[in-house]
Image (cartoon, rainbow, N blue to C red):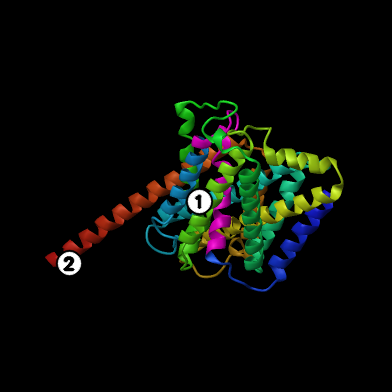
C-alpha cells in the first residue's frame, strides 16, 4: 500500500506541475525548501560518532551562515556577453550544485523509507526524482506544492518541540547519557554544509527574482535549533545512527497496519518533491543560460524537454547511490568553490580592462 501511495502522490504532483495553474511561491517558503538539502546533509559526517548539543549548534550555524553568504555575488549568470568561458563554467557549476542538492534531499527522505517494509529505497528515489523533474519542467502549481511541503516541515518541527518539552530531559543536553566525541578534523566537515548553503542556486534565485531570503532564514534557524534541541532532550542528549528516533517510529509504523505507513510515506514524498523541485528549476534556468549564445536560432539542446532530460538523468544517477555521499559532497563543494574563484578572477580581469579603457580614453 505504501508503494502505491508514493507512486500515486508522485504522479499527481508531476501532473499538477505540467497542467496546473501558474502560481508564484512565497519567498520565505522557497527559502525554507531551498535550505532543506543543506539541512539534511550537514550532519552526515557526524552520523557514525553521533550528534550532541555542540554538533547541533555547529550544524545550525553552518547552514544559516551559508544561507546569508549566498547573497554575495550575482543571483544569476548571464552568459550571453562578457567573459563567456568563465560565466559558462559558473553556470555549469550552478547546474551541478542544484541537481546535487535536489538529489541529496531525496536521498535523505529515502533513508527514512528504509524501515518501512515493501518499499525499495532505490525505486522510491527514482520515482521521486522523475516526479520532481517533471514538475520543475512544467513549472505550474509551485505555490501549492512548496507551501504544502513547508507546512509539513513546520508541523514536524512543532511536534518535535512539543515532544521534547513534555517528555524530554533538558538536563541531558549538557550531560548526555552516552558520550559523543569527534576529532578536530571532523569539525572541518561543517565547512561542507556552509559551502553547499552558500552556493545554493535556489537561494540565489530568490534574490534574482526580487525577493529576500531573510524571513525564510529565520524560520530555518528556528526549525533547526528548536527541532534538534527537542530531539536531543527526548533522546538523552545524543543521537546516533541507526538508532534514530524517527527511523524507529517509521519501523514500528511499517510493521503494523499499512495505512499509517502509507500516510507517512506520502508526507515524506511531498516534502522531498517540494524541496527538489526548487533545485531542479534553478538547474534548468542555469542550464538554459549556459546554452544561450550570440548565434541566431534555437537548437534542440535548448528545448525544455532536452534540459529536463539532462537534469533528470544526472539527478537519477546521484539518487541511485552509485557515488557514495561523502565523496559526492566533497566533489560538489569543490565545484562550487572553483566557480567562486572563476567569478573572482573574471571580476578582477574585467575591472582591470575597464580601468585600462578609461585610461586610454583620458590619454586620447
Count of marks overlaid on the render: 2
Image spot of residue 133 (x, y percent): 66, 57
Q: Secondary structure at mark 1?
A: helix
Few, some or many residues within 10 Å of mark 2 (<14, 14–19, 20+): few
Q: Which residues are magenta?
A: 28-54
Image location (x, y in percent) of residue 21: 67, 74
Residue appearing at x 39%, y 55% in the figure: 72
Magenta stretch: includes residue 31: yes
Measure how far apart labels 2 and 1 are at the Cα level.
51 Å
Residue 221, numbered label: 1
Quadrant of the rendered image containing residue 29: bottom right
Q: Give percent across and percent down for residue 152.
A: 66, 56
Which residue, given by chain and number where applicable, does mark 2 sit on?
Answer: 361
Asked if the magenta segment contains residue 35, the reply would be yes
The one nearer the camera, 238 or 307, is 238
Mark drawn on residue 319: none
Closer mark to the observer between disc 2 and disc 1? 1
The chief SS type of the magenta part is helix
Residue 202 visible in the shown view? yes
Position of residue 115 in the picture relative to residue 147 (left or right): right
User: In the image, 258: left or right of 179?
Assistant: right
User: Would you place residue 159 above or below residue 120 in this image?
Assistant: below
From the viewer's side, name the closer residue of 53 and 362: 53
* CB-based contact (under 8 Å), mark 2 and mark 1: no
Percent x, y for residue 204? 47, 58
Quarter assignment of residue 179: top right
Q: Residue at x 46, y 59 (%)?
A: 214
Amino acid at each position: 500500500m505504501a508503494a502505491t501511495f508514493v507512486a500515486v502522490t508522485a504522479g499527481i504532483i508531476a501532473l499538477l506541475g505540467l497542467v496546473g495553474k501558474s502560481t508564484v511561491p512565497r519567498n520565505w517558503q522557497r527559502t525554507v525548501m531551498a535550505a532543506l538539502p543543506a539541512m539534511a546533509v550537514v550532519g552526515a559526517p557526524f552520523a557514525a560518532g553521533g550528534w550532541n548539543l555542540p554538533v547541533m549548534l555547529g550544524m545550525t550555524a553552518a547552514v544559516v551562515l551559508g544561507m546569508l553568504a549566498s547573497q554575495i555575488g550575482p543571483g544569476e549568470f548571464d552568459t550571453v556577453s562578457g567573459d563567456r568561458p568563465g560565466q559558462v563554467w559558473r553556470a555549469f557549476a550552478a547546474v551541478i550544485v542544484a541537481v546535487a542538492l535536489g538529489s541529496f534531499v531525496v536521498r535523505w527522505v529515502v533513508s527514512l523509507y528504509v524501515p518501512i517494509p515493501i518499499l525499495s529505497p532505490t525505486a522510491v528515489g527514482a520515482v521521486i526524482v522523475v516526479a520532481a523533474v517533471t514538475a520543475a519542467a512544467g513549472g505550474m502549481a509551485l505555490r501549492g506544492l512548496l507551501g504544502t511541503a513547508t507546512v509539513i516541515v513546520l508541523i514536524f518541527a512543532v511536534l518535535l518541540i512539543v515532544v521534547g518539552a513534555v517528555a524530554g530531559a533538558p538536563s541531558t543536553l549538557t550531560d548526555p547519557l552516552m558520550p559523543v566525541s569527534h576529532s578536530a578534523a571532523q569539525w572541518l566537515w561543517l565547512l561542507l554544509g556552509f559551502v553547499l548553503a552558500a552556493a545554493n542556486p535556489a537561494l540565489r534565485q530568490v534574490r534574482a527574482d526580487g525577493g529576500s531570503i531573510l524571513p525564510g532564514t529565520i524560520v530555518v534557524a528556528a526549525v533547526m535549533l528548536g527541532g534538534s534541541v527537542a530531539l536531543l532532550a527526548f533522546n538523552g542528549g545524543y543521537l546516533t545512527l541507526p538508532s534514530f528516533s524517527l527511523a524507529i517510529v517509521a519501523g514500528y509504523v511499517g510493521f503494523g497496519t499499512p495505512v499509517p505507513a502509507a500516510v507517512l510515506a506520502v508526507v515524506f514524498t511531498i516534502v522531498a518533491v517540494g524541496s527538489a523541485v526548487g533545485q531542479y528549476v534553478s538547474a534548468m534556468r542555469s542550464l538554459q543560460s549556459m546554452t544561450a549564445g550570440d548565434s541566431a536560432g534555437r537548437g534542440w539542446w535548448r528545448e525544455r524537454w532536452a534540459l529536463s532530460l539532462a537534469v533528470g538523468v544526472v539527478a537519477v544517477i546521484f539518487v541511485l547511490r552509485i557515488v557514495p555521499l561523502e565523496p559526492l559532497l566533497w566533489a560538489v563543494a569543490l565545484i562550487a568553490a572553483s566557480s567562486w574563484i572563476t567569478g573572482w578572477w573574471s571580476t578582477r580581469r574585467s575591472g582591470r580592462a575597464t580601468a585600462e579603457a578609461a585610461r586610454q580614453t583620458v590619454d586620447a
